Image (spheres, rainbow, N blue to C red):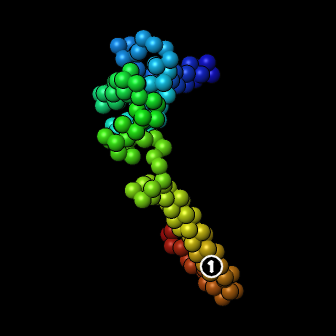
Amino acid sequence: MLRLIVFLLSMVIPMAALAVEPDEILNDPVMEARAREVSKGLRCVVCLNQDIDSSNAGVARDLRLLVRERIVAGDSNDEALAFIQARYGDYVLLKPPLNARTYVLWLAPPAMLLLALSVGLVTLLRRRKKPVPQALSEAEEHEIKQFIENQKVGESK
């Protein structure tokens, strides 16, 4: 049991480590906190559903440095985010806005869920409509018994 716990912890702890490298960290803790806040809202375009703050990909590092540059230049968090969004599009946001370009992104998951539920429901309904096998008549039961007896007699010879 202890081995299992140690194994599970060894699998979880590395995921909690942030990928921000020491040379990226800003000297001002307030600005660094702002940079981390902005970074947590940006998607790594390589890792997909991982924010750039916890991604080791090269493009994530470049985005983290760009965010820090914008904050040092005097941009607010929203301005830094808007700058990155203008360059990379809505795709770079972990929570993209709901607009005409992102309808598919927002509507595909519920549509897929409805489709899966519909398929499941149709399958269940079809299963219920299958005819129930009828009991054998006396003549059929007698014929089966005769067949089995003939098989036994044939095997014993």
Which is more toward the observer, 118 or 20? 20
Image height of 26 relative to 135, above or below: above
- Left or right of 149? Residue 54 is left
- The picture places residue 49, in percent across and down from the top left corner, at 43, 39
Q: Position of residue 144 (x, y in %)?
A: 61, 79
Coordinates of residue 128 in the picture (x, y in percent) = 64, 74
The residue tagged 1 is 129
Viewer-closest of 131 and 79: 79
Tell me if residue 140 comes above or below residue 69 in the rendering: below
Quadrant location of the N terminus in the rendered image: top right
Q: Is residue 150 visible?
A: yes
Q: Could you tell me the amino acid type at mark 1? A: Lys
**Residue at point 42%, 34% (across, down):** 79
Residue at 68% in and 81% down: 135
State how many labels appear.
1
Q: Residue at x 55, y 21 (%)?
A: 9
Tag 1: Cα neighbours inside 10 Å, few (<14), some, or many (≥20)? few
Q: Which quadrant would residue 74 be assigned to in this image?
A: top left
Q: Nearer the viewer, residue 66 or 53?
A: 66
- Residue 11 in sight here: no
